[in-house]
Amino acid sequence: MKFLVLLLILFTSCANGEKSLEVERGNTRYGGYLAFASVSDPKSFNPVLAKETSTTSITGLIFEGLTRVNVYTKEAEPNLAKSWQIKRGGKEWVFYLREDVKWNDGVPFSADDVVFTFNSLIYNSKIPSSASDVLKVDGEPFKVEKIDDYSVRFTLSSNYAPFLMAMGTDILPKHILADVVKADKFNSFWTLDSTPSGIVGTGPFKLSRYIPGQLVELVRNEHYWKKDKDGNSLPYLKGVRFLVVPNSDTALLKFLDSEIDYYSLRGEDYAILKPEEKSKGFKIYEVGPAFGSSFITFNQNNSINPKTQETYIDKRKLEWFRDRRFREAVSYALDRSSIIDIVLNGFGYPQSGPLSPSSGYFYNSNIEEHGYDLDRAKELLSDIGFSDIDSDGILEDKSGEDVSFNLFTNAENNVRVKIAELIKEDLINVGIKVNFLPLEFNNLVTKLSSSYDWEAIILGFTGGIEPHFSSNIWLSSGHLHIWYPKQERPATSWEAEIDKLFKDGVQALGRKKRKSIYDSWQEIASRELPLIYTAIPESIFAVRDKFGNLDPNPYGGVFHNIEEIYIINKEE
Amino acid sequence: MLIYILKRFLIALPLILVISLVAFLFINLTPGNFFNQMRLNPQISEETIEKYIELYQLDKPVLMQYFAWLKRIIHLDFGYSFAYNIPVAKVLGTRVLNTLLLTLSSLFFTWLVALPLGIVAAVKVDRAWDRLISFLSYVLLSIPTFFMAFLLLYFAYLAGILPLGGMVSANFTELSLFFKILDLFKHLIIPTLVISLGAIASLVRIMRGNLLEVLRSNYILALRARGISEKRVTYVHALRSAINPLITIFGYQISGLLSGAALTEIICNWPGLGSLMLSAVRSQDIYLVMGSMLVSSVMLIGGNLIADILLGFADPRIRVK
């Protein structure tokens, strides 16, 4: 198959050999632009201060880290560092840097830049960097020292298993930023009104133009270090453009109209795009489960509100929510296949554990799945002592009051609102009444993080491949341990168990050992159901039929190897 | 007249002050703050978020924040946007220009088309032309703007001539000046139509109604009795008085120049104030919201003032009062 593709590429590039005059060293792969749609403007061009994806999708092309994640093995692989050595049982790491790397202004890259990035930027207490939390072990920063121009030593206060993964953080140029930091101006540096050429990274592209609300244009970095196997310098593309298109229906039309080359499909778009595939010249890739999750969670916070001297929610309900059988019954009562059919238009998978099947190595495929089983759900509910005394179809608890709860989600998320409607119907089938109320996002977050006055919430987290990076969710002391955040000591034995697993998991260095630790975590999570997962969408991408070296992947997306991607048919 | 204008100015100042105070309090009444969206990111610790809140002084009492803001406004400093980390004036600048480009072109187009059509409808009252124009304006009046936007975008997609939303094409940067202007013009057509069509429809109705009313009044009858030609009666005498009420409408349209196009902007992907404001309000980017609110209220008050002044010029009865 690969051979065939290669032949095809050879054939097409021969056929167009005469036409495309944009040739560098006789190679026809060079040239052309790739056009994306971005939901919003970038917010900054400063990768250290970047807070959201419309910014990082752009800075990610301009800057690079010492390592990068291999999208197939999901392990860290060399990038700006060509190799590394582990010493003292994982507490000391020595990185050997590539010597052929230059910043896009032509200045050579060296160990000074790495040391500067960590010591003067990421660990600088005056700079609010969202990356700094991942680059600490037990709240302690790493000690970063230069050994010589091309080697750097990192000393850790204790073992940190995701260390190599964390080393993917972007490295910034000392020769540009040293003075800026000294003048205390870094927090307002490399903003949207900066001169494009002043933004200096080592990545395959550099910023060339930004028109607010309309367009971000990047062009190839001629100093980029990576070469293809024939020794031609990469990237092949002349540049990349991001058109700002806030409305996804407009983006869809723009994709059909060939103005953009890539569109990430929602389930409902499939029926529109699939029939046009041939005539409009694009291809739809279904690459597997995505990473985002959607779950329903119940408030289990039984601590006392200092203001009222009572629990944050009704004690009676708290008792149900803290009963595993109740959560299990809800899980059995969820008809996940209808969620997939109705909400995701058939493009999804039932989810039962915290990791996406696409996360690879750490995913535990043996965890217990809760199929749709109304009898089992009813049985569990009557075990708790719920019964329909007044036969109005709604169960009553021991005190004789209706079993009902309020369910919140953020109103602007259509998928969650639809899931909530379905869950409401599913639960009435087993006699639980749900009052669904969509809320404004900030209101919801306030309830979750400070007022704690909620009963049930539908939410989702963007998942990843490294379980430790979700420790703020799973550690009982974590602020995102949303069902009962910031506990002083674990409220239940299973939470204590998960705490221990996460503490072991971050220390253990062998991959196998970590796998078995995180396997047990996933087992406990799917047994105790603090988060009752619903469904995970399929990643579907549509890409215009003109790119070579395309290799879509659920983790990396379509353009994870953007420096190697080239345009087969250049229409110019 | 000058004293009148001066008076209006003096009334406007406390009005703006009150508007800004109410707006500021309301944004702060909604739960949470800008940095709430970071709270659900598992990789960001609470300490980091607290650091941001402290840095932007969101931990201070609301009134203190308001007066600090007010103090800066007096020096024409609109503060920083949390999201963009650059001065609010810079974020607003290009957006305001984009919105003005769109709304002014729609305003121009609306009046250019609506006035003649309204006159034709009134002159040819109850004849085929009038019926057609009335029918079309009823249809256009009943289509909501957002739907009209989608409809036109879909037609544009089918026809394949006009660009589908946005303000410039992807290859804008490579074009020569002439083609840049052409490209911009092409992008302007659909959103302009979306905003104008509804406005044209209602303006045609008003123009027709006004002119008919005037044409049926006694002094027109008197003019006709004096033997003045029908053309002169209609286009010189009747038209002038029929247009008077429209001047007020024109003033109101000026006041809506910055805010009237939000929905169209969002759907047609026009990088104006609309979409910026929506996300700023949603994410509680306070100073950005306040900045644009201030600009909009100045426009509103200014628009009304302009309307009154114009009316004063056109109608001596008002000037005398």
Image (cartoon, helix red, strand yellow):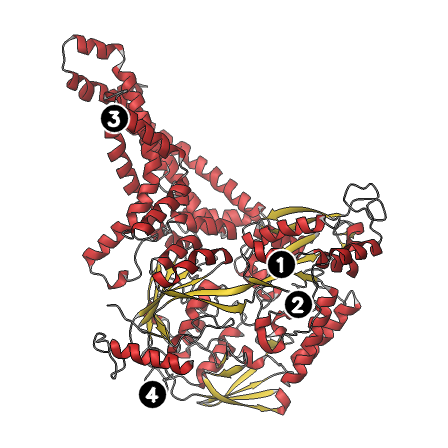
In primary-sequence order, the first of circles 2 and 4 is 4
The CA span between labels 3 and 4 is: 73 Å
The secondary structure type at the circle numbered 3 is helix
Please give the residue where the numbered disc 1 appears in the rendered image: A337
In the image, taking residue B51 as reference, residue A427 lies left or right, namely right
* Mark 2 and mark 4: Cα distance apart in space: 45 Å
The quadrant in which the C terminus of chain A is found is: bottom left
Question: Which chain hosts label 3?
Answer: B
Residue B311: % across, % down: 29, 26
At horizontal 51% and vertical 50% (from top left) the residue drawn is B282
The answer to whether marks 4 and 1 mark residues whose Cβ atoms lie closer than 8 Å is: no
> In which image quadrant can residue B110 be found?
top left
User: Which label sits on residue B129?
Assistant: 3
Query: Is there a contact, CB below 8 Å, between mark 1 and mark 2?
Result: no
Mark 3 on the same chain as mark 4:
no
Name the N-terminal-most of marks 4 and 1: 4
Give whichever of A198, A552 is nearer the camera.
A552
Looking at the image, tell me whether mark 1 or mark 2 is earlier in sequence order: 1
Q: Is residue B284 visible?
A: no
- Chain letter behind tag 4: A
Which mark's residue is nearer the viewer, 3 or 2? 3
Q: Are marks 3 and 1 on the same chain?
A: no
Report how far apart the C-alphas of labels 3 and 2 lie in the structure. 68 Å
- Reading the image, the residue beneath label 2 is A353
From the image, tell me which residue sits under label 4.
A231
